[in-house]
Amino acid sequence: MKMHYTLKFNPRVIQDLEDEDDLDKVVSHSDDFANVYLVDLPCVEGIEANIPNRELAIGGPPVPFPSSNASCDAIPNTMMLSRGFVSRCADSEYTPLESIRFREAILGSGHTFKNAEEFRNAIYQMSLGGRLREINPGTIAEYTSDEGHFMQLFIAHAFSIQGFIKGCRPILAIDSCHLSGPYKGALLSAIAYDADDGMFPLALGVVSSENYEDWYWFLEKLKGVLDGKEVVIISDRHQGILRSVSELFGIGNHAYCYRHVKENFSSFLNKQNIRGKKGKEDALLLLDSIAYARLEIDYNEAFEKLVRFNDNLGKWVVDNNPEHWAMSKFPKKRWDKMTSNIAESFNAWLRDERHQTIYTLLLMHMDKLVAMLDTHMRGTEKWKSVVGPKTEENLMSNIMRSDPISVLPYLGGTFKVFTGEVYLVVDINQRTCTCMTWQMSGLPCSHVCAVIRTLRHDVYDYIDPCFHVSAQHLIYSGQFQPLPTHNMPKVCEDGSLQDCAGNFFSTLQPPHVKRPPGRPRQRRIESQFTHKRAIHCSRCNGIGHNRFKCNNPLP
């Protein structure tokens, strides 16, 4: 049964949009309400919905108007809409909003909104950056538009900027993930490490897709917040990232994520004539030896073994720029960070928020970010020493491995260390070791720990200051104020937006949305090296099948 309603509409409710309640009065929306058309005809509100017969109970509760069944069929004698606007509505699943007041401000380009929440987001986005900068001075919030439509957004909160500059190590992991909300696009991120290798988000961006132009714009803004601090960028080998990082940060500061390199190597390995699972595992172990070798001599030895194993694999290593992912070849200090896993963790951390609209995503991200930062701050109070639990675990491991190492003091603060196989030299004053671990990671290796034990010194005095609790306090020493929304801008008579202070904002339309070809992917493409839980059979206690597929005889 199809019914049409024409209700009286009080125009006074759209005079002032002081808060969200006022906006809800203009456009009521929920799963139980009909879609609303604001029309040119004064004091008229047209509602049209398909109502199931079973809901038309006499004497029962008020009949709901399910928005999922709303129709966009125009009624000319009631709505007085233009032919172009009617055709756009008929071909769209969106519910149009139209009025003299809102036509130029919101529908200037013909875009329509699905519900009042998206309509509110379009208004709020125009002043979001300014309010973030106002509430938290030092915050960088910038966006770009094209012909009035939203294009790019970059946000780096003042708390994150100050924390990174004051105490974080100069290394960042960048990555992107898809947004599955109504406007699609991609979410770009730059993630740092705190004093105990905790995730410390520095900046995020919302762009149309992962391409060179968007990556260059995002990284250009990111470079601007670093205050001239030189950093090492870790990422995958997306062509847009390769080009933009080399142009903005220098090719010598770009480290490739070894996990992605290893997956590419594994794909190439499958095309080679290598028999058996054992052969593939041996080739991957040889690649690990090449990547994690700290000395040039160890790198060459591992590389020669790989060439003897398969000459094509050796050529693959040479052709894929080992100077960007092999430890011994990389020219800068990368603090033993070989992958961009922390950026991947950030993407998974925002898995639910990525389904929201842009404005909702930003607000939810702020709340979630503050909760995580507060957890890290409170966790610092539980540190049992001057370093965090993760750093303490690595340090204790090095101390345990230093027991069988013998030390012979030399002059000038140098020591001859014998591991049982080779002799190494430790310079306690210059803080160097022949194995290069101390220089690369900032933590004393087992050879240095043996020397420190001989000197009866405190091992914590030889740890890089970026791991100390004092650095952690500096990272989390800022303030982060919440973002109030009670006094957001309102739509004026001329279609512009004005806040309570009299500041005007240009109109902004939502981004253009293009539906990608094919069926939307529901599950991400898993890594080849993801460890899956083994299936156990409860009938025979075997591995690799369950009891329903078990063919083994019972004992």
Image (cartoon, rainbow, N blue to C red):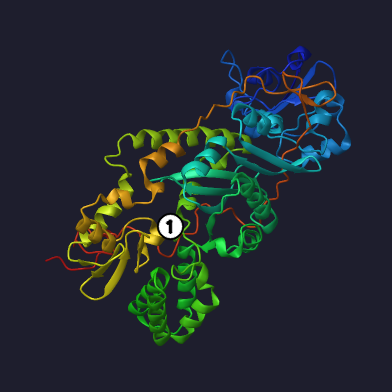
Does residue 298 lie above or below 540 as drawn? below
Tag 1 residue: 335
Residue 85 drawn at (x, y percent): 83, 36
Residue 41 drawn at (x, y percent): 85, 20
Q: In which quadrant will I find the N terminus?
A: top right
Q: Nearer the viewer, residue 88 or 140?
A: 140
Residue 159 drawn at (x, y percent): 53, 35
Q: In the image, what residue occupies the spot 30% across and 36% down?
A: 382
Q: In the image, what residue occupies the spot 59% across and 15% down?
A: 58
Q: Give the farthest residue toward the front.
A: 411
Residue 369 drawn at (x, y percent): 49, 36
Q: Is residue 61 visible in this depiction of the protein?
A: yes
**In screen coordinates, is 150 left or right of 461?**
right
**In screen coordinates, is 206 left or right of 347?**
right
Q: Nearer the viewer, residue 134 or 372?
A: 134
**In screen coordinates, is 354 left or right of 45?**
left
Q: Give the farthest residue toward the left.
A: 555
Q: Amino acid at mark 1?
A: Trp
- How many numbered marks, from 0 up? 1
Q: Is residue 197 visible in this depiction of the protein?
A: no
Q: In the image, what residue occupies the spot 80% across and 28% down?
A: 98
Q: In the image, what residue occupies the spot 38% across and 81% down?
A: 301
Q: Quadrant of residue 77?
A: top right
Q: Residues within 10 Å of mark 1 (few under 14, many from 20)?
A: some
Q: Nearer the viewer, residue 87 or 284?
A: 284
Secondary structure, mark 1, is loop
Q: Quadrant of residue 493?
A: top right
Q: In which quadrant will I find the C terminus?
A: bottom left
Does residue 348 lie above or below 259 as drawn? above
